[in-house]
Image (tube, rainbow, N blue to C red):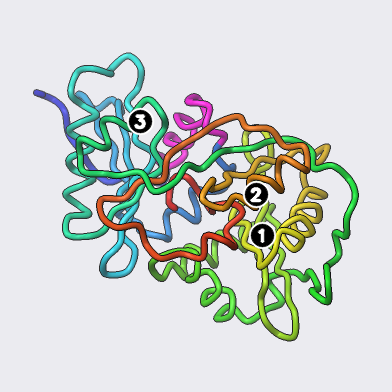
């Protein structure tokens, strides 16, 4: 491994990593890297061979006990030569002692199991233009509002029902970056749903999509889709919520991609019955 070195990613590296993810067909968000960087500025690693970037990984720390692996990519010309596994070990070492999660593509899941990960559910990406019909302005006394009009503490507390650690800096950037739309469903001062849509290389992606009921999820989805060219959207749907799977099938969205949510220990206790779309396959 002479000439191979691992170091933290620079701002330019973050844009490079996005480009690599795009080439892998992962449809990354155009501005995701800005939210990723504030989640854990030291959590993105790049492996270089004689100064040339050949592999990357993210190993992001959340709170005191949770971590998430993502962006595990070796450039095609350098695969099978041990550079990726060196980077993998560096990322896992950075998260040593924590419960670690990841979203594993099908062809890598056996390798992740060898590293101690176990499947909790599958996240199935569905894409399409939601079929018209239904109320996009609210349902059953629930109003849909701009999430930026709500106290941020309410949003952060609501997000904790669906994620096992605080991530306030990330959430603030994720919901507030220019070009994005974040909507909340509110009833009697309580948040009963949250959705964010962001521009991506292909279909605009919606995530997270949290909702107390399928009807609230559908209303948020339809409102968010108004911000996508032609209404074309993509959502990473956990199959652990069968109502979410049924909802998107009924709205005409079709599966295009799949990854397994995996953990190194017991899966966190999350409100899966109200999780209709995960935030990000890269950072959880």
The residue at the point 83 percent across, 68 percent down is: 139
- In this rendering, the label closer to the viewer, 3 or 1: 1
- Among numbered discs 3 and 1, the one appearing first in the sequence: 3
Determine which residue is flagged by label 1.
195
Residue 223 x %, y %: 80, 56
- Among numbered discs 1 and 2, the one appearing first in the sequence: 1
Task: Specify the label residue 261 is tagged with.
Answer: none
**SS class, disc 2:** strand
- Tell me whether circle 1 and circle 2 mark residues in contact (CB < 8 Å): yes
The residue at the point 41 percent across, 32 percent down is: 105
Question: Which quadrant holds the N terminus?
Answer: top left
Determine which residue is flagged by label 3.
73
Q: Is residue 20 magenta?
A: yes
Residue 61: which quarter of the image? bottom left
Residue 80 x %, y %: 23, 17
Residue 82: which quarter of the image? top left
Marks 3 and 1 sit apart, C-alpha to C-alpha, by 28 Å
Determine which residue is flagged by label 2.
206
- Among numbered discs 3 and 2, the one appearing first in the sequence: 3
Asked whether the viewer can see residue 12, the reply is: yes
The residue closer to the viewer here, 187 or 203, is 187
Residue 170 x %, y %: 47, 62
The residue closer to the viewer here, 228 or 195, is 195
Q: Residue furthest bottom?
A: 188
For this view, does 38 lie left or right of residue 142?
left
The residue at the point 13 percent across, 25 percent down is: 3
Residues in magenta, as a range: 12-27
């Amino acid at each position: 491994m002479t000439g191979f070195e691992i170091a933290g990613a620079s701002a330019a590296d973050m844009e490079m990593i996005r480009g690599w993810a795009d080439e892998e067909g992962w449809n990354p968000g155009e501005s995701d890297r800005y939210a990723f960087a504030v989640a854990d500025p030291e959590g993105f690693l790049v492996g270089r061979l004689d100064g040339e970037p050949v592999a990357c990984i993210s190993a992001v720390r959340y709170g005191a006990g949770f971590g998430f692996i993502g962006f595990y990519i070796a450039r095609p010309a350098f695969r099978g030569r041990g550079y990726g596994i060196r980077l993998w070990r560096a990322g896992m070492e950075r998260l040593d002692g924590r419960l670690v999660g990841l979203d594993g593509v099908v062809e890598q899941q056996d390798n992740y199991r060898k590293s101690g990960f176990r499947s909790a559910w599958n996240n199935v990406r569905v894409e399409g233009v939601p079929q018209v019909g239904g109320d996009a302005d609210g349902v059953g006394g629930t109003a849909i509002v701009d999430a930026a009009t709500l106290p941020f503490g309410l949003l952060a507390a609501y997000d904790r029902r669906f994620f096992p650690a605080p991530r306030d800096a990330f959430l603030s950037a994720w919901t507030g970056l220019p070009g994005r739309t974040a909507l909340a469903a509110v009833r009697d001062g309580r948040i009963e749903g949250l959705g964010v849509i962001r521009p991506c290389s292909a279909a605009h992606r919606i995530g997270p999509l949290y909702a107390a009921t399928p009807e609230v999820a559908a209303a948020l989805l339809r409102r968010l889709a108004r911000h996508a060219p032609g209404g074309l959207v993509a959502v990473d749907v956990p199959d652990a919520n069968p109502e979410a799977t049924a909802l998107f099938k009924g709205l005409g969205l079709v599966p295009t991609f799949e990854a397994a949510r995996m953990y190194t220990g017991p899966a966190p206790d999350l409100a899966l019955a109200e999780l209709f779309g995960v935030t990000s396959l890269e950072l959880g």
